[in-house]
Image: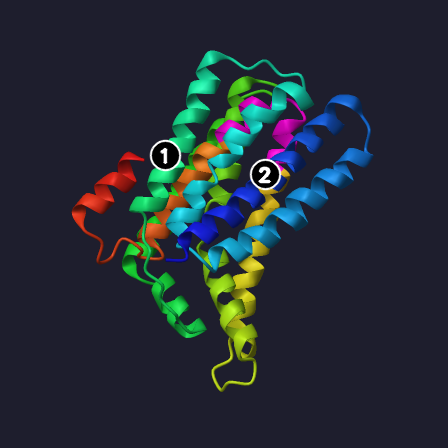
């Protein structure tokens, strides 16, 4: 079983990502722009490197749910790095997220399936996957429509932008596909079916870069006006939900799993 390695790598990724997001918040509070650069290095370089590595060891539905560790790191660090108040509810919430992350690791999909670029495109074109895309588009449209009616600086506006950013960032099925293809191509770059020779690989990698950078940009905008404990918690909650749904409905990671395992996964 290789999924514990994936969880460990994602723990490092989420720690780097949390540090980067807090630096972005610190830069917004102090006006010291050098912290923006440091924050972006951690969130846009270090975090993705470990995140991509994690996806080569575990299923998307596990790694995306493990992103909840961001909330745990944030609760542990924000009172000291940003001076933000830590309530009893936030302590309890972070403990539940940590327990849920462990349960996800045990109950999530542990199957390892090697696919070609063409097979990934076929997987993503299934009716079930298309239904997920339509539902996601409708959710983003609802957020956008509501944002047009909410003034700048309002808590609801921050919630909506952070929720939309997390929902977008959690759609990591292209990340999972690109990571697996990158690993297989690097292992044997001279093989006939090397993914590096397929335009689909670069399409998947491009989609990954676009969604991740857009989600990070939106979160950065929220952090300019709202506390990290609020913004990052909302972002991570919707990231987990989006990642779990897309992992099971787009990547079809629920297939073949027993009902008890699916029930434990949903409970976590």
32 or 184: nearer the viewer? 184
Crowd band around label 1 with a 10 angstrom C-alpha radius: few (<14), some (14–19), many (20+): many
Q: Residue at x 62, y 19 (%)?
A: 79
* Snapshot colouring: rainbow
Q: What is the count of numbered marks?
A: 2
With respect to residue 85, does 201 lie above or below? Answer: below
Image quarter where the N terminus lies is bottom left
Residue identified by numbered label 2: 15
- In the picture, residue 157 is in which quadrant? top right
Q: Position of residue 191 (x, y in %)?
A: 51, 85
With respect to residue 45, does 83 lie above or below? Answer: above
Q: Position of residue 205 (x, y in %)?
A: 56, 62
201 or 38: nearer the viewer? 38
Q: Decide whether residue 228 is among the magenta residues.
A: yes
Q: Position of residue 226 (x, y in %)?
A: 61, 21
Instruction: Name the mark on residue 100.
Output: 1
Left or right position of 46 against 131? right
Q: Which residues are magenta?
A: 218-234
Instruction: Judge whether residue 156 can be spotted in this image.
Output: yes
Tell me the SS state at disc 2.
Answer: helix
Considering only order in the chain, which callout, 2 or 1, is on the residue closer to the N terminus? Answer: 2
């Amino acid at each position: 079983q290789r999924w514990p390695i994936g969880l460990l790598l994602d723990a490092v990724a989420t720690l780097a990502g949390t540090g980067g997001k807090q630096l972005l918040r610190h830069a917004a509070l102090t006006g010291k722009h050098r912290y923006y650069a440091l924050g972006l290095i951690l969130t846009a370089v270090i975090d993705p490197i470990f995140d991509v590595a994690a996806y080569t060891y575990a299923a998307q539905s596990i790694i995306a749910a493990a992103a909840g560790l961001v909330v745990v790191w944030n609760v542990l660090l924000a009172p000291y790095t940003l001076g933000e108040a830590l309530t009893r509810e936030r302590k309890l919430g972070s403990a539940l997220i940590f327990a849920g992350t462990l349960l996800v690791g045990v109950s999530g999909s542990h199957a390892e399936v090697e696919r070609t670029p063409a097979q990934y495109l076929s997987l993503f074109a299934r009716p079930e996957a298309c239904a997920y895309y339509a539902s996601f588009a409708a959710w983003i449209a609802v957020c956008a429509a509501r944002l047009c009616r909410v003034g700048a600086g309002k808590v609801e506006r921050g919630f909506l932008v952070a929720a939309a950013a997390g929902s977008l960032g959690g759609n990591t099925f292209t990340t999972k596909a690109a990571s697996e293809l990158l690993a297989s191509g690097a292992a044997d770059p001279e093989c006939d079916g090397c993914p590096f020779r397929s335009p689909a690989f670069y399409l998947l990698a491009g989609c990954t870069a676009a969604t991740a950078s857009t989600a990070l940009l939106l979160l950065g905008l929220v952090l300019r006006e709202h506390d990290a404990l609020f913004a990052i918690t909302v972002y991570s909650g919707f990231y987990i939900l989006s990642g779990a749904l897309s992992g099971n409905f787009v990547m079809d990671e629920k297939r073949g799993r027993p009902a008890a395992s699916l029930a434990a996964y949903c409970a976590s």
